[in-house]
Amino acid sequence: MDRLPPTILRRVVLAPLVFVLSILALTFAPVALLVAAAVDFLTPGYWRAVRILGFVTVYLAMEVVGLAAMFVLWLASGFGLAMRSDGIQSAHFAFMRWWLGVINRTSRVLFQLKIVIEDRPEPRPGPILVFSRHAGPGNSLLLIGTIMIGYARHPRIVMLAKLQWEPLFDVMLNRVPNRFIRHDPARRERYVETITELATGLGDSDAFVLFPEGKDFTPRVRRRAIDYLRAKGHDLAAERAEKMEYMLPPRHNGVLAAMQGSPEADVVLVAHSVLEDIGSFKDLWHAIPFEEPIHARYWRIPQQEVPHDTDELIEWLYGWWERIDAWIAERVAIPKPSARPPG
């Protein structure tokens, strides 16, 4: 999935194809929703098929609207010549904020999704570097939504290259300051330099975002990450990672590169609970509607309290990852109010 078609093919073939297919799918959505309702009626429970298909329908509609909006903004920018102008950049961020708001509201209504931010930090000026755990498919959207809607900041995000298979993400997120990277050891130094470049020049309305674990958490990925550390001779790191039940071992190179690009920035560490249980469509099916709220926690650490020496930073990162792991474990251990029957 990391091997992408050239940009020109993604723009003139993939994006238009997905645009047309999305419109075609939307024309059949009413019939599909009736079929889903019939299935749910015959298998009474929680109207899961209608909920999921309803979300897919909204998402496809937002894909169509988004690609159309990107085309209009491309025309407004003089066929891309003024794409980096302040006005066009602001228009892209405004659309992203609106798009995220629609997806967020749809999730809350259809999935009964509730988000509780514990000890919510008050907005304060100054650049920030946001380092978040990867807690599942919805983690990134929740985090970016909080940053853009809750705190009115413009995110600069480091993401995996495979996300560019999604045409709207590909077009929209490549137009504003973001970077897509691959897991390619041969180009590691270049990716580290890219992270430093992206984190440089942050203002009060910006937020650099990085996921130090590099991948979504699953028990299998966790096991592989620990085995990798042992194979590389990092036995102490592997032992500490083994004691963390809900976290992947953090990678320090990107974190250090970001701090080198913006040494004056505070660091914000982010954790979400519940999402680690949703690693597949089957998990999502059984979780809907969500009985438990998603708990989130944001810790803002002043830059003078963050070590910049490599060895000290690794120790600091592992210490915080262990703290976040304990925070998640506490919420997982909270007794559930009711036992949902299987199905």
Image (tube, rainbow, N blue to C red):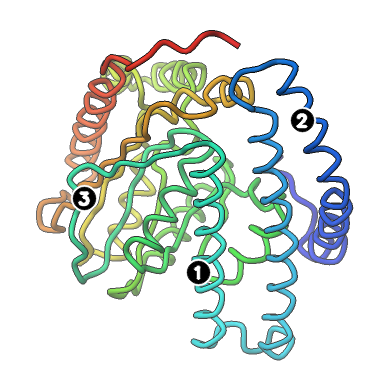
Task: Count up the numbered dots.
Answer: 3
User: Considering only vertical position in the picture, is 276 above or below 210?
Assistant: above
Residue at the left extreme, as displayed:
305
Q: Position of residue 96 (x, y in %)?
A: 54, 66
| Quadrant position of the N terminus in the picture | top right
The local secondary structure at tag 3 comes to loop
Q: Could you tell me how far apart the alpha carbons at marks 3 and 1 are, in whole angstroms?
A: 27 Å
**Front residue (pair 323, 66):** 66
- Residue, x 20% and y 30% (percent of image)? 323
- Residue, x 23% and y 54% (percent of image)? 267
Q: Could you tell me how far apart the alpha carbons at marks 1 and 2 are, in whole angstroms?
A: 40 Å
**Residue assigned mark 3:** 120
- Mark 3 or 2: in front is 2
Residue type at numbered disc 1: Pro
| Quadrant position of the C terminus in the picture | top right
Examine the image and state in which quarter residue 119 appears: top left
**On the rendered structure, is 235 left or right of 157?**
left
**Residue assigned mark 2:** 36
Q: Position of residue 287 (x, y in %)?
A: 52, 23
**Front residue (pair 191, 31):** 31
**Residue assigned mark 1:** 177
Q: Could you tell me how far apart the alpha carbons at marks 3 and 2 are, in whole angstroms?
A: 39 Å
Residue type at numbered disc 3: Arg
The local secondary structure at tag 2 comes to helix
User: Considering only vertical position in the picture, is 334 above or below 101?
Assistant: above
Residue type at numbered disc 2: Ala
User: Considering only vertical position in the picture, is 119 above or below 205?
Assistant: above
Q: Position of residue 307 (x, y in %)?
A: 16, 49
